[in-house]
Amino acid sequence: MRVVARRMLFLLPFLTALLAVPALAADVDFPPPDTAVNARSITTYLDLARHFVPDIKGTDNGYVGQKRTPLRHISGKDYGDEATDTLGFYDIATTRMKADGKERLLVLFDFAQAAKTARGVAVLALYDVSGEPKLLDAADIGLDQSTYFFDQALMSVAEGSDVILTMSTHFNSSQTYTTQSMIMVQDDRLELIDTAFLFNERLCTVERQQNVRYAANPSAGKPYAPIAMVVTETVTPTNADCGADASNEPTGKREIKVTYTWDTIAGKYVADSDALQKLAKANEQRF
């Protein structure tokens, strides 16, 4: 217990200082699927998509296909292939990142855009585009109906190494469900660091918002800097006359803070608490 207490005393000032370091947002592009990947290539983004859905083609309802190449899920074997008869997208998202000092292209194919499923099929693909595009690795990162790069798509954790930030989400009239993912690249392979499940809702009496922010200082650790993740939950009254639906739901703001540090022996990032798991369980109880 004393060791844990000393570690927390060390991390708290670090976390406070780290969150003052602004994280740079990466440029995310949405190139037309039939355009070349770069000026040196005749390969189009649609050609890249056909590696995962070989029969995909343009239709009146976006780019659609039925065949699918088997692919691992970033979360492991517990996530089997989503059963669907149709796969397709309207647009794709790309961004340039650095991995182990090398420039790489990331392409996100959300194949559930034109074919809605309970858990979408979203392929994140990593390419070397120093010449003709070379596929280095790919994984299904879909954890909900729709998957996107987060507003802050990349976060530098070392000189020449970025962490990838994505989100999978769906919503109904009064609730929004979002799973945030942190992904890194080691030896040109995509690896999941962790996920966080966020839940927004509007009741008659209160509105709940959960937002996340990340920060890392590339000079603060070797070989990779610690990552600070903070989920801010804000519960505000609606001031509506709810009658029999009135409740005593507490209002206010709280922060859930988790710091990830690199474990050299395990070769992965390790969280300093189970706060995100506890948040996920509390959110699930509100469904």
Image: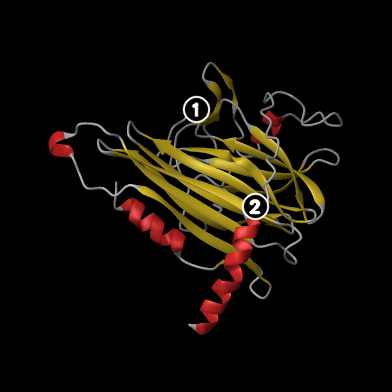
Q: SS for tag 1? A: loop
Q: How many marks?
A: 2
Say which residue appears at 59% left-offset and 51% top-offset.
214
**Residue 14 lies in quadrant:** bottom right
Q: Which residue is mark 2?
A: 20
> In terms of depth relative to the viewer, which is nearer, 243 or 105?
243
* Of pointers 1 and 2, the one earlier in the residue sequence: 2
Residue 167 in the image, given as x and y percentages of width and height: 53, 43
Kindly report the distance in space between the C-alpha atoms of the residues bearing marks 1 and 2. 40 Å
Which secondary structure, mark 2? loop
Mark 2 neighbour density, 10 Å: few (under 14) some (14–19) many (20 or more): few
| Residue that lies at the very extreme toward the left in this rendered image | 244
Task: Give residue 109's position: percent from left, percent from top.
Answer: 60, 36
- Residue 190 as seen in the image, left or right of residue 285: right
Q: Nearest the camera: 37 or 170? A: 170
Q: Foreground: 59 or 6? A: 6
Residue type at mark 1: give it.
Ala
Using the rendered image of the protein, determine whether residue 121 is visible from the camera's viewpoint: yes
What residue is drawn where x is 60% and y is 47%? Answer: 165
> Callout 2, which amino acid?
Ala
Closer to us: mark 1 or mark 2? 2
Rendered location of residue 143, percent (x, y): 48, 46
Taking the spot 69% from the left edge, 31% from the top edge, the residue there is: 29
Residue bearing mark 1: 114
